[in-house]
């Protein structure tokens, strides 16, 4: 039972991600019927049919065949939807960042003191701890 629920939710997410609604799946019969009409009437193959109804030939096909307009509205994948998420673009100007004033001090004085508490075994080499920060 869990597998069926997981598969169902996965398919729902997949279909919503591809912008396919349940209404589109119900209208697939209309798509098949209209394709058969175009195949018999005009001799169109499936790719030409898709191009006439969803692709670059859509405008010219709808102008030539105004009598089929009601059938075209019943076809699936005809819904127009505005994007839900708006993309934010930030433009940063380097001059405004350089000339901006900040309340954070640029030079901070330390509130600590380092006491050298052991003898010099290694001498004054490069790997000694800092004496004043």
Image: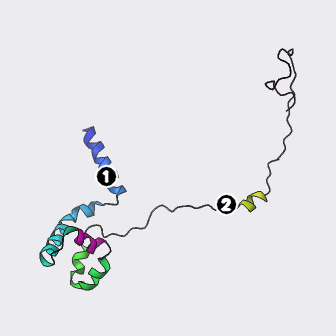
Residue at which label 2 appears:
92
Residue shown at 29% from the left, 67% from the top: 77
Task: Please tell me whether residue 60 is drawn above or below residue 122 in the rendered image.
Answer: below
Q: How many marks?
A: 2
Give yes or no for residue 3 being in the magenta stretch: no
Q: Secondary structure at mark 2?
A: loop
Residue at which label 1 appears:
12
Q: Which is nearer the N-term, disc 2 or disc 1?
A: 1
Q: Quadrant of residue 84?
A: bottom left
Question: Please, what is the dominant secondary structure of the magenta stretch?
Answer: helix
Task: Please tell me whether residue 18 is drawn above or below residue 36 in the rendered image.
Answer: above
Quadrant that contains the N terminus: top left
Q: Position of residue 81 (x, y in %)?
A: 39, 67
User: Which sits in the foreground, 53 or 72?
Assistant: 53
Q: Position of residue 16 (x, y in %)?
A: 34, 56
In the rendered structure, find residue 3 and report the number of the disc placed on it. Answer: none
Decide: few, some or many residues near mark 1? Use Cα within 10 Å; few <14, some 14-19, many ≥20: some
Q: Secondary structure at mark 1?
A: helix
Q: Quadrant of residue 33?
A: bottom left
Q: Residue farthest to the left?
A: 40
Query: What are the residue bounds of the magenta stretch?
Result: 47-55
User: Which sits in the foreground, 71 or 61?
Assistant: 61
Residue 128 placement, left or right of 67: right
Quadrant that contains the C terminus: top right
Circles 2, 1 touching at the beta carbon (< 8 Å): no
Task: Please tell me whether residue 45 is drawn above or below residue 4 in the rendered image.
Answer: below
Residue shown at 86% from the left, 25% from the top: 114
Give yes or no for residue 53 being in the magenta stretch: yes
């Amino acid at each position: 039972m869990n597998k069926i629920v997981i598969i169902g939710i996965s398919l729902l997410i997949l279909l919503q991600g591809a912008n396919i609604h349940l209404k589109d799946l119900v209208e697939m019969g209309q798509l098949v019927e209209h394709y058969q009409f175009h195949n018999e009437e005009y001799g169109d193959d499936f790719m030409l049919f898709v191009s006439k109804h969803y692709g670059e030939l859509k405008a010219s096909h709808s102008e030539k065949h105004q009598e089929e307009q009601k059938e075209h509205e019943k076809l699936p994948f005809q819904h127009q939807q505005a994007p839900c998420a708006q993309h934010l673009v930030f433009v940063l100007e380097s001059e405004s960042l350089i000339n901006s004033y900040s309340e954070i001090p640029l030079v901070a004085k330390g509130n600590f003191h380092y006491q050298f508490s052991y003898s010099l075994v290694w001498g004054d080499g490069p790997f000694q701890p800092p004496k004043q920060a």
